[in-house]
Amino acid sequence: MIRSIPGSVKDIKTLYHTINELDAGGKILILDRGFFSEGTLEFLAGKKTSYVLPAKRNSHYYDTRIHLNEYFSYHDRLIKCGKRRYNDFYLYLFEDQDLRLEEQKTLYRKQDEGTIDKEKFDEGMKRAGKILIISDMDREKQEIYRLYKKREVVEKMFDTYKTVLNADKLYLQDDESVFGHVFIAFLSLYIHCKLEQLLKKAKLNHKITPIDLLYNYSKVYHLEMDGRGMITEVPKQVMDFDEALGLSMFPKIIRS
């Protein structure tokens, strides 16, 4: 969905209006912790939309006793987990052991530097590496965690949208111009994602980016002369990419 929104997009009212406009019945809404509040929980409770909502680190829900009596592996990271029913929803607590160590190191460094007091140090140590997720769904803990992590894919696309495509640099004055700019940028992002999928499938995503791939293909031209179509010489590197990606864009024999 693409639309212009008056005021601040971070305003919680924006979320309310957007969900009310969407036909989201039977869907699962995965939110960022920036939207977390008691008001959000009350609002979502009255909808037919399920949700996965991470709590802010200073939330009182972290004080709820939840035993981390299970574990699973996620991208070679050990995740301890536990679950507890709380009123009309469920609390899912996860502890990433790698993240826990990283955050503890940071807390010790800040304590040595004198940038945090003992109260903040103790509170940080107690919650290091932990992610508390609230959901109305009674599911397996690993499933809820994977749903939450899917948000990272969306965030990566937004980062590409802003940094690679430079789509967030707007100097436009009216809604129509902004919509046109965003829509074309969205199409560009769609193409970028498709190319990224092709590269990943061919196991080339660690060697070349979609932008580099387009640059290589741009060296080949299709010419129209006297009613005949002709493809200019195709560099070997481009032919190798074309074969590896299975695109078959160029004929095996190029006629002069």
Image: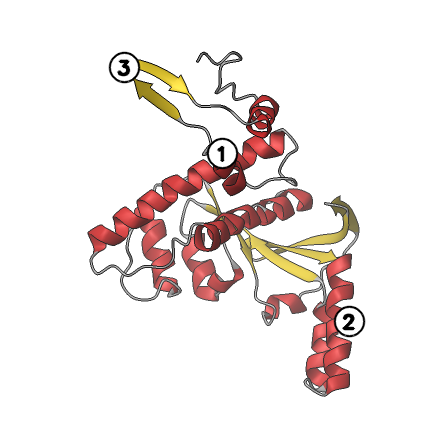
> Is 105 drawn above or below residue 139 in the view shown?
below
Mark 2 secondary-structure assignment: helix
Q: Of callouts 1 and 3, which one flags the residue occurring earlier in the amino acid sequence?
A: 1
Amino acid at circle 3? Asp
Q: Using a 10 Å C-alpha cutoff, classify the residue at mark 3 as few (fewer than 14 neighbours), some (14 to 19) or many (20 or more).
A: few
Amino acid at circle 1? Lys
Q: Is residue 110 visible?
A: yes
Mark 3 secondary-structure assignment: loop
The label number, if any, that marks residue 153 in the structure image:
none
Residue 72's quadrant in the figure?
top right
Q: Which residue is mark 3?
A: 226
Gap in Å between the C-alphas at discs 1 and 2?
39 Å
> Is 208 drawn above or below residue 155 in the view shown?
above
Q: Using a 10 Å C-alpha cutoff, classify the residue at mark 2 as few (fewer than 14 neighbours), some (14 to 19) or many (20 or more).
A: some
Q: In screen coordinates, is 67 left or right of 252?
A: right
- Residue at x 70%, y 55% (from the top left corner): 94
Q: Which numbered disc, 1 or 2, marks the residue closer to the eye?
A: 1
Q: Which residue is mark 2?
A: 105
Q: Of callouts 1 and 2, which one flags the residue occurring earlier in the amino acid sequence?
A: 2
Image coords of residue 109 (percent x, y): 76, 78
Q: In screen coordinates, is 76 left or right of 4?
A: right
Image coords of residue 170 (percent x, y): 32, 59
Q: Which residue is mark 1?
A: 194
Residue 147's quadrant in the figure?
top right
- Residue at x 69%, y 62% (from the top left corner): 130
Residue 101's quadrant in the figure?
bottom right
